[in-house]
Image (cartoon, grey):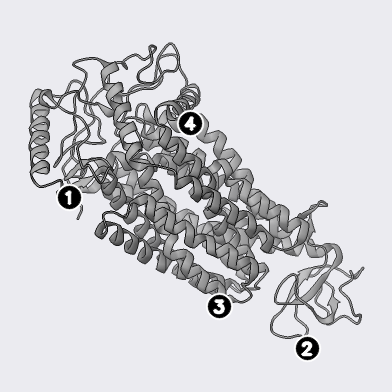
């Protein structure tokens, strides 16, 4: 089955529509929430004016009440009782420009939760829900046509949740913004699983893809052709003989061509995935840049910056539906897998396949398991840096909404440039693997929490660190995903990407909780940088032990055993001349009698009554 240009743009369009959520909503919605909760906290014991940040010197050595009625007359920041609560926090004229107000008692809800910790707790809770949801439904996307449908359903839910944000910008409606954050984060995160599951299928279908990610040995996967090969697409066992002959002929021609040229032509599967993944990052942040510029105009147009920011969050909801739902709905094919096993629910199948995937990964793909262990740890460090930086800038550096927006625009401008740079370096220096790029990015990212712990006192330093972060984080995301792509056995894309997402979320709740706990206990975000540095260091150390060549070999053995278990005559991809073909999307890890993996006695071939996937026009992406 060829790959049509329209389908590639359908995949990229989802990134255009949903990409801005992860930087715009994840940044602006917490700021709205924190501002609401900050005003609610000030109702208890009034406010205090401090220089620069929450731990700064008290301005004028006095306090004002929440009504903003001039400077205090004492020499401390003790609470001031009495007086009505007013929403007019006017800075006394004699105070310096860097003076900002903070609640005397920063806790809300009658408990020990600091108002600035609220987004971290909301994020941690949403991640917990994501883990349960991913376990329940993620792997079931490999069956039937659920992959596309569930991707679009979750994107729609996330978009609608964001659209409701402007209606909840009153002080005491901060809890509604918590719900908006949780629902949208869960929905967009779930949709991303199914979107990621398309990557191996689309990348493998690109013309010129000749094999897997072993750069030293550019041999093809068994039974898979090049040129117009169908590396990730399912061809049914009822494919015509002419198609098989064509595929076989293409395979033979490609093999000899590759051999005679010393393996210099074409792309490996990982190189194709690297290219698509890197371009997805560039497209995403180009979309982010455009959206942020629009949001900056919206925020500046409203006298109330909080309401303007809420409206800018609502814009993301409309953007998601307009670009992240409708174009993929029209352009992406379903690329269905085998039918749902008889008598099994999607929940049971999903949980069963994840359980089986974990077992198979541990026994049959130990290098992939090692990679997931590393990712399990270092992804928490990379995600927590982004989640905490904006709140840190607002509270500890007293950066305004305008300054925060400038920093976000800076990030969006630099990330595509950094991604292009690292992709160029890796393509020019063939010895520089995706693993090497990842290790370099982690080493650079490790410098950020170290500097934040001992320095980082001004906005210009924040801008500088944002530039450094931006230059490597895009490559980190892109090469993490593409490196894992080359470890995935064909036909199990959704199952393994569901496991990948669960691995990501497995500790993603821990980072925000640590930050929130430290802030609640000390009132200072800086000490939380220690935990971020630990996540990056430990995860990077484990990643050093991963052997990508060995991982590719383990995957090929897995697929070969799977093809053998399915028996003769069931292969459709390689044709008669290419040995045992592998009909990717028809492979199953879950049998009717229980869970099994290739090579086990309980393994059974899947049901043969699987319809073909419609073919499309071919596309070369240069």
How far apart in space, not on screen, are marks 1 and 4 (Cα)?
A: 33 Å
How far apart in space, not on screen, are marks 1 and 3 (Cα)?
A: 44 Å
Q: Where is mark 2, residue-wise?
A: 94
Q: Which of marks 3 and 4 is nearer the N terminus?
A: 4
Q: Which residue is drawn at 9% across and 34% down?
A: 252
How far apart in space, not on screen, are marks 4 and 2 (Cα)?
A: 59 Å
Q: Where is mark 4, residue-wise?
A: 137
Q: What element carries label 1?
A: loop
> CB atoms at circles 3 and 4 under 8 Å apart?
no
Q: Is mark 4 on a helix, strand or loop?
A: helix
The percent position of residue 110, horizontal first and vertical second, equals 83, 52
Q: Splitting the image into 4 quarters, where does residue 421 fall? A: bottom left
Q: Which of 280 and 217 is in front in this view?
A: 217
The label nearer to you, 1 versus 3, is 3
Q: Earlier in the sequence, mark 3 or mark 2?
A: 2
Residue 319 visible in the displayed image: no
Q: What element carries label 2?
A: loop
Badge 2 crowding class, 10 Å Cα cut-off, few under 14, some 14 to 19, many 20 or more, is few
Q: Splitting the image into 4 quarters, where does residue 553 fall? A: top left
């Amino acid at each position: 089955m060829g790959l049509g240009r329209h389908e590639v743009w359908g995949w990229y369009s989802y990134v255009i529509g949903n990409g801005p959520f992860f930087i715009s909503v994840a940044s602006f919605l917490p700021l709205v929430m924190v501002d609401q909760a900050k005003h609610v906290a000030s109702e208890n014991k009034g406010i205090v004016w401090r220089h620069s940040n929450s731990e700064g010197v008290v301005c004028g050595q006095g306090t004002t009440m929440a009504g903003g009625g001039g400077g205090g007359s004492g020499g401390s920041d003790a609470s001031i009782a009495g007086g009505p609560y007013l929403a007019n926090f006017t800075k006394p004229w004699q105070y310096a420009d860097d003076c900002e107000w903070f609640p005397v008692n920063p806790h809300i809800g009658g408990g020990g939760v600091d108002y600035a910790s609220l987004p971290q707790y909301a994020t941690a809770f949403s991640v917990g829900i994501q883990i349960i949801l991913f376990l329940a439904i993620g792997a079931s996307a490999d069956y039937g046509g659920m992959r596309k449908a569930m991707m679009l359903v979750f994107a729609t839910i996330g978009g609608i949740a964001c659209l409701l944000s402007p209606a909840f910008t009153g002080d005491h409606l901060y809890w509604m913004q918590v719900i908006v954050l949780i629902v949208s984060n869960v929905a967009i995160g779930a949709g991303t699983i199914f979107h990621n599951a398309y990557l191996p299928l689309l990348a493998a279908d690109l013309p010129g893809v000749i094999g897997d990610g072993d750069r030293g040995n550019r041999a093809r996967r068994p039974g898979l052709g090049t040129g117009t090969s169908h590396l990730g697409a399912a061809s049914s066992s009822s494919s015509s003989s002419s198609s098989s002959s064509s595929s076989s002929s293409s395979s033979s021609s490609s093999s000899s061509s590759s051999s005679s040229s010393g393996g210099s032509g074409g792309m490996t599967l990982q190189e194709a995935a690297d290219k698509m993944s890197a371009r997805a990052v560039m497209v995403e942040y180009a979309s982010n840049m455009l959206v942020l510029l629009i949001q900056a105009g919206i925020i500046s147009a409203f006298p109330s910056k909080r309401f303007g920011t809420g409206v800018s969050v609502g814009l993301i909801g409309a953007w998601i539906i307009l670009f992240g739902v409708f174009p993929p709905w029209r352009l992406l094919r379903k690329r269905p897998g085998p039918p749902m096993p008889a008598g099994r629910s999607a929940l049971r199948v999903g949980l069963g396949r994840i359980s089986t995937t974990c077992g198979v990964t541990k026994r049959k793909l130990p290098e992939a398991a090692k990679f997931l262990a590393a990712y399990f740890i270092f992804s928490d460090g990379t995600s927590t840096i982004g989640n905490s930086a904006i709140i840190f800038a607002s509270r500890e550096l007293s950066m305004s909404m305008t300054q925060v927006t400038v920093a976000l625009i800076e990030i969006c401008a630099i990330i595509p440039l950094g991604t292009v740079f690292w992709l160029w370096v890796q393509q020019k220096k063939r010895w520089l693997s995706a693993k090497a790029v990842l290790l370099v990015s982690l080493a650079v990212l490790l410098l950020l929490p170290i500097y934040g712990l001992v320095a980082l006192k001004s906005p210009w330093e924040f801008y500088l660190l944002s530039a450094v972060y931006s230059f490597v984080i895009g490559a980190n995301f892109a090469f993490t995903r593409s490196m894992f792509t080359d470890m995935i056995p064909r036909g199990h894309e959704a199952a393994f990407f569901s496991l990948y997402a669960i691995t990501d979320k497995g500790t993603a709740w821990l980072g925000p909780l640590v930050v929130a706990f430290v802030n609640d206990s000390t009132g200072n975000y800086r000490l939380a940088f220690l935990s971020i540095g630990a996540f990056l260091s430990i995860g990077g150390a484990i990643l050093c032990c991963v052997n990508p060549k060995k991982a590719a070999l383990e995957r090929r053995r897995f697929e070969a055993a799977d093809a053998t278990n399915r028996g003769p005559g069931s292969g459709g991809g390689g044709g008669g001349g290419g040995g045992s073909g592998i009909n990717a999307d028809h492979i199953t890890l879950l049998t009717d009698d229980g869970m099994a993996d290739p090579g086990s006695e309980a393994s059974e071939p899947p049901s043969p009554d699987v319809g073909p996937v419609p073919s499309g026009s071919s596309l070369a992406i240069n």
